Image: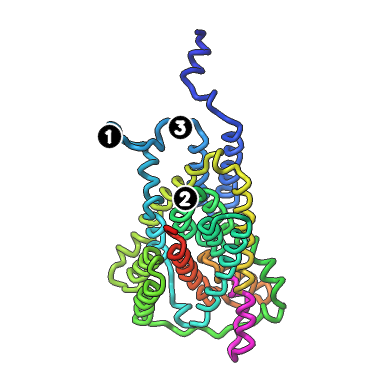
């Protein structure tokens, strides 16, 4: 045996496949979007890193434990997804970061958050028609809610083999909100509608905020118990924020906790994206249906806002209906930007935050409904 043969026998170069190389390119695209374009970098960068690991000839990173030997590092880290720990912890941080004041001040915006779930339901039916199982279709449909943690949560329970492509689709489209939503919003509204100025929101008291959080917790869990993990953590985070007496806990949930969990969640999602499982026609179908779901959710929110204006003496700017998807706060910022394109003195951000946070609750409830109906059947 020559020195070169001995070297090659020691290395893993001969284990590299063409699918791995293609996935290296995919990882490169994700890194480019995260670093150069700053599209959801906090998730896309860890996902890309995990995906790169998945497409290298690893030794033992995903190895299951035996009676004589411990498992690999990512076997244990991935339990956070398999045991549905990471998504609820992300919701804890989201709750601590979220101000429910706008939706309390203008309860009508709850309807806009609910309307945006149309994309989830229509895509579910479309995926079933394309021969995906109901479990897979439900997981794909949730992409329309533009809620990454919820998409991962339901996929890990109903369609674990699709966690990778569903997560990539969900977070990619969340990142592309400023590109996807504006053309739909402008197509469905007139310039006059985009110039509608809404009345300033009233001040919401601390007591109202706390009552809302506790009432939402109780009502949602009573209606959809399967969503309790997500809803309970969302409201716990918000209660820590609004109580005003546990600032250290609130700050920890907003910063250290959500950041640490985001690293683990992203890399563990990425490590499911091996070339053998990701490079399939089904993956392209999921990506295509995801953007359709997102577009329908955006359009539904805008159209329902226009419909509400037919019966209301206090008009709603239809642009805020597009914020009914759960991409907080990006979708609300898009509504603000589009409103100011038509009228530079129009300020829609806080109004748009109402349907935006309502969309978070709505998507979690729909996910809970799907789990209750499909899990174990």
Q: Residue 13 in magenta? A: no
Q: Say what secondary structure mark 3 lies in.
A: loop
Specify the segment rendered in magenta.
302-323
Residue 100 seen in the figure: yes
Q: Residues within 10 Å of mark 2 (few under 14, many from 20)?
A: some
- Which callout, 1 or 2, points at the residue further toward the start of the chain? 1
> Total of numbered circles in the picture?
3
| Quadrant of the image containing the C terminus | bottom left
SS for dot 1: loop
Mark yes or no: residue 345 visible: no
Label 1 crowding class (10 Å Cα cut-off): few <14, some 14-19, many 20+? few
- Residue furthest out toward the bottom: 313
Seen from the viewer's position, the closer of residues 316 and 160 is 160
Q: Residue 67, which numbered label? A: 1
Residue 65: image quadrant is top left
Q: Residues within 10 Å of mark 3 (few under 14, many from 20)?
A: few
Residue at image location 48% in from the left, 13% down from the top: 6
In primary-sequence order, the first of circles 2 and 3 is 3
Residue, disc 3: 58
Q: Secondary structure at mark 2?
A: helix
Q: Residue at x 39, y 35 (%)?
A: 63
Label 2 belongs to which residue? 160
Q: Residue at x 44, y 77 (%)?
A: 101
Q: Position of residue 223 (x, y in %)?
A: 40, 74
Q: Residue at x 56, y 43 (%)?
A: 278
**Looking at the magenta stretch, what is its main secondary structure?**
helix
| Residue mark closest to the camera, 2 vs 3 | 2
For marks 1 and 3, the one nearer the N-term is 3
For the residues labelled 1 and 3, the Cα–Cα distance comes to 22 Å
Q: Nearer the viewer, mark 1 or mark 3?
A: 1
């Amino acid at each position: 045996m020559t020195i070169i043969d001995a070297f090659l026998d020691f290395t893993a170069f001969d284990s590299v496949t063409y699918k791995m190389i293609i996935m290296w390119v995919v990882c490169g695209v994700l890194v480019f979007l995260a670093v150069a374009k700053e599209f959801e970098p906090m998730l896309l960068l860890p996902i890309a890193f995990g995906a790169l690991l998945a497409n290298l000839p690893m030794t033992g990173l995903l190895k299951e434990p035996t009676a004589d030997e411990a498992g690999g590092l990512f076997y244990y880290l991935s339990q956070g997804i398999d045991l549905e720990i990471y998504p609820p912890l992300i919701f804890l941080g989201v709750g601590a970061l979220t101000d429910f004041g706008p939706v309390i001040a203008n309860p009508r915006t709850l309807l806009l958050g609910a309307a945006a779930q149309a994309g989830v339901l229509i895509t579910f039916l479309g995926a079933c028609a394309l021969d995906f199982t109901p479990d897979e279709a439900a997981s794909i449909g949730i992409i329309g809610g533009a809620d990454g943690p919820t998409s991962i949560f339901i996929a890990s329970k109903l369609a674990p083999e699709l966690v990778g492509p569903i997560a990539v689709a969900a977070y990619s489209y969340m990142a592309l909100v400023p590109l996807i939503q504006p053309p739909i919003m402008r197509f469905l509204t007139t310039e006059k509608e985009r110039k509608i100025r809404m009345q300033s929101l009233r001040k919401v008291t601390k007591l109202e905020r706390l009552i809302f959080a506790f009432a939402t917790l109780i009502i949602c869990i009573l209606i959809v118990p399967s969503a309790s993990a997500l809803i309970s953590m969302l409201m716990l985070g918000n209660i820590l924020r609004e109580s005003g007496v546990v600032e250290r806990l609130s700050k920890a949930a907003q910063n250290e906790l959500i950041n640490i969990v985001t690293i683990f969640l992203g890399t563990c999602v990425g490590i499911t994206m091996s070339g053998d499982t990701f490079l399939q026609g089904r993956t392209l179908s999921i990506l295509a249906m995801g953007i359709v779901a997102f577009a329908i959710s955006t359009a539904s929110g805008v159209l329902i806002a226009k419909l509400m204006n037919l019966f209301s003496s206090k008009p709603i700017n239809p642009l805020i209906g597009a914020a009914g998807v759960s991409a907080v706060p990006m979708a609300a910022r898009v509504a603000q930007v589009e409103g100011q394109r038509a009228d530079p003195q129009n300020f829609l951000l806080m109004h748009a935050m109402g349907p935006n946070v309502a969309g978070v609750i709505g998507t979690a409830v729909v996910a809970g409904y799907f789990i209750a109906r499909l899990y174990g059947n």
